Image: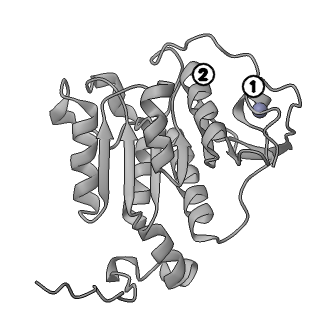
């Protein structure tokens, strides 16, 4: 049998993306299509980021989140469904994302973030979004991103406040530079959450990821962006690398 070499075909964006091509260009859209984003946690924040990345035409999402859907999740976890209470979160998330954009490839794991287990997910991704609620897992993810040189969009919320920065290993402060000593575990349902606020944080993480992948705009690096959605105030503070950081010191570029 004679094999005919497959002709490289030019990328033609689907009509689904016609309204965003003026922003991203065909090349930017192709980059999204060719990219993989690992979202650690698909709750109120990560789930919203996943929705908008799927809708924007990301090629592949890797998602990880443990456990079953419970009623207190439903004020913010909009990938979940009231009819699925008691069922596995990750399965429901995959179904929802496929409904939004059946062309997005979704790889899903019903698990927390542990260094050895999550290594392959980070290695496979172009960008990582940290959307875990507690610091021990955030630190594990941060260390993986530093070790494997993957940009990480660090998004968090508490009550009606949001914070966001982009960590570029070797160039910007890492999570441990910014928060060196937060190793106490957090109770997942132990802090206040408004769904609309976690949704904004998820949208910001999705926008930042799309910017990083497509090359538009300026990454939100070396600054910590804070928004108080209660009083509609926002500010940013400059952040610097810690030369004694227990995670990234000695790994300068
Ligand atoms: Zn550091």
Residue position marked by numbered label 2 in the rendering: 135
Ligand 1 location (quadrant): top right
Give whichever of 81, 14 is nearer the camera: 14
Q: Is residue 219 visible?
A: yes
**Mark nearer the N terminus (1 vs 2):** 2
Q: Extreme front residue here? A: 1
Residue sitting at 85 percent across and 40 percent down? Answer: 239
Q: Quadrant of residue 175?
A: top right
Q: Is residue 160 visible?
A: no
Q: Position of residue 131 (x, y in %)?
A: 52, 36
Q: Quadrant of residue 19?
A: bottom left
Q: Position of residue 229 (x, y in %)?
A: 64, 41
Q: Are the residues tagged 1 and 2 within 8 Å (C-beta)?
A: yes
Kindly tell me whether mark 2's CB lies below 8 Å from ligand 1.
Answer: no
Residue 1 vertical placement versus 151 (above, below): below
Q: Position of residue 26 (x, y in %)?
A: 49, 84
Q: Is residue 193 left or right of residue 96?
A: right
Residue sitting at 43 percent across and 57 percent down? Answer: 52
Residue sitting at 65 percent across and 72 percent down? Answer: 216
Residue position marked by numbered label 1 in the rendering: 179
């Amino acid at each position: 049998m004679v094999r005919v070499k497959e002709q490289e075909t030019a990328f033609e964006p689907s009509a689904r993306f016609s309204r965003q091509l003026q922003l991203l260009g065909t090349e930017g859209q192709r980059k999204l299509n060719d990219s993989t984003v690992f979202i650690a946690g698909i709750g109120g924040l990560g789930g919203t980021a996943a929705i908008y990345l799927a809708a924007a035409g990301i090629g592949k999402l890797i998602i990880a989140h443990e456990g079953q859907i419970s009623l207190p999740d439903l004020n913010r976890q909009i990938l979940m469904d009231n009819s699925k209470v008691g069922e596995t979160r990750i399965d429901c998330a995959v179904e929802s994302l496929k409904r939004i954009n059946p062309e997005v490839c979704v790889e899903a794991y019903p698990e927390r973030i542990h260094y050895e287990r999550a290594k392959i997910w980070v290695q496979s991704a172009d960008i990582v979004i940290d959307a875990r609620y507690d610091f021990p897992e955030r630190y594990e993810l941060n260390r993986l991103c530093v070790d494997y040189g993957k940009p990480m969009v660090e998004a968090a919320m508490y009550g009606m406040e949001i914070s966001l920065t982009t960590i570029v290993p070797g160039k910007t402060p890492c999570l441990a530079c910014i928060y060196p000593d937060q190793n106490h575990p957090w109770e997942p349902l132990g802090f206040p959450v408004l769904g609309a606020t976690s949704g904004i944080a998820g949208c910001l993480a999705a926008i930042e990821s799309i910017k990083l992948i497509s090359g538009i705009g300026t990454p939100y690096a070396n600054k910590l962006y804070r928004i108080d959605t209660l009083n509609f105030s926002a500010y940013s503070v400059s952040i610097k690398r810690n030369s004694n950081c227990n995670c990234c010191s000695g790994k300068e570029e």
